[in-house]
Image (cartoon, coloured by chain):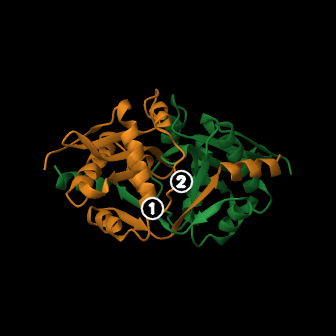
Chain colours: A green, B orange
Amino acid sequence: MNVEIRPAKENEMEDVLSLINELAIFEKEPNAVTLTSKDLISHGFSNPPLFVCYVAIYKGKIVGMFLGYPRYSTWKGPTMHLEDLIVTKKMRNQGIGKALFSSFIKYSHSKGVKRAEWAVLNWNSDAIKFYQENGATIYNDWQVAQMNEKAIHNFILGNK
Amino acid sequence: MNVEIRPAKENEMEDVLSLINELAIFEKEPNAVTLTSKDLISHGFSNPPLFVCYVAIYKGKIVGMFLGYPRYSTWKGPTMHLEDLIVTKKMRNQGIGKALFSSFIKYSHSKGVKRAEWAVLNWNSDAIKFYQENGATIYNDWQVAQMNEKAIHNFILGNK
C-alpha cells in the first residue's frame, strides 16, 4: 500500500481539521472543537510553531495525521507529546496508523527526547493494545485535571 | 504569613531540584529523577525557555515552587500545563500551595490560554479535593501512556 507520511502544509489545515473533528466524534465529544483551520495555520506555522503535524497521503488525499509538541519532565527533561493520531474511518486497519505512530516516534527520537507520551481513553481497548504491543506503558494511577476558560475566569474573580 | 511568589532565578535551580526530589519521593518514585540542576538551568533559561518556574519564598528561603509550560489542544488551541507544584513538607497547610496554584492560574490567564491542565495521582485525595474546590474537573476516562528512552530505542530498532 503506497502511503506517504510527510509534514503537513498550511493549505492542508482544512483537511487536518476534518480529521480532528472525526476524532472528536469518535471520542464522544462531537461539539468540543472550537478551533478553526485559520487558527491551526497561525499556531502551526508561526515562528516557533506551537506544534508539529504530519499527514498520511494515499492516492493524493489526506487520510490521516498526527499532531504533537514538546513537553518537559522534571524527572527526565525534554519529552514529546502526541496530542492526536487519526486515520479516517474507511482507511483504518491497513497499517496507516502504525506508519503515523512510527513517524511520530522517529521524529521524537530525532529530537533526542527522553520520553514520548500521550493520553488514551480507557475504553479504547484497540488503541491501548496497539500502544502496549509497541512498547508503551499505560499508567492507571494518573488522572487528568483541567480548568477551562470559564473555570479560569471564575477562579481569578474569586482570588483577586 | 509573609510569602513572596516570584519567577525563579538560575542560581535557585539547586533548591528547585531538591523540591522536585521531595515530590518524587511523595509520589513513590524516589529514584525517578535523573535531571540535574545544570539541566534545569540550560532548559529553563534558554531562549526560548522550555518551562516557566515560580518559587515561594518565606524568610529568605525557597519553600515551594511551580513549574509549567505551554501545550496545545486541537479542540481549543493554546493551553498551559502544570507539571509540578510542590510545598516542602514542614511548610504545608498554610496556604502556600494555594498561593502557588493561584499564581500559575493567573500566569496562564495572562497568556490568554483556553485551558489549564495537569495530572494528579488518583490516591492523592487531598490534591484532588483542592483542585475540585478551585473549579477544576478531574477526568477518570483518560489514561497516561508513555514510552521511555529504552522503549523508543527498541521501537526504532524493530521498525526500520
Chain of the residue under the numbered disc 2 shown in the image: B
Chain of the residue under the numbered disc 1 shown in the image: B
In this rendered view, identify the residue nearer to me: B95 or A65: B95
Task: Report helix, strand or loop for mark 2.
Answer: loop
Q: Are marks 1 and 2 in contact (CB under 8 Å)?
A: yes
Q: Horizontal and vertical percent for residue B69?
A: 43, 43
Residue B159 appears in the picture as rendered: no
Q: Are marks 1 and 2 on the same chain?
A: yes
- Name the residue at 85% across, 47% down: A2
Q: Horizontal and vertical percent for residue B30?
A: 49, 57
The 10 Å Cα crowd at callout 2, few under 14, some 14 to 19, many 20 or more, is some
The relative height of residue B81 versus residue A31 in the rendered view (above or below) is: above
Task: Tally the numbered discs.
Answer: 2
Quarter of the view holding residue B122: bottom left
Precedes in sequence: disc 1 or disc 2: 1
Which quadrant of the figure contains the C terminus of chain B? top right
Horizontal side of B32 relative to B22 (left or right) equals right
- Amino acid residing under circle 1: Glu
- Amino acid residing under circle 2: Ala
Q: Measure the C-alpha gap from mark 1 to mark 2.
A: 10 Å
In this rendered view, identify the residue nearer to me: B72 or B148: B148
Task: Report helix, strand or loop for mark 1.
Answer: loop
- Name the residue at 64% across, 37% down: A111
Residue highlighted by disc 1: B27
Horizontal side of B151 relative to B157 (left or right) equals left
Q: Horizontal and vertical percent for residue B68?
A: 40, 45
Horizontal side of B62 relative to B2 (left or right) equals right
Q: Horizontal and vertical percent for residue B119?
A: 44, 59
Kindly give the residue lying farthest to the left in the view shown. Answer: B1
- Name the residue at 49% across, 35% down: A42
| Residue B32 badge | 2
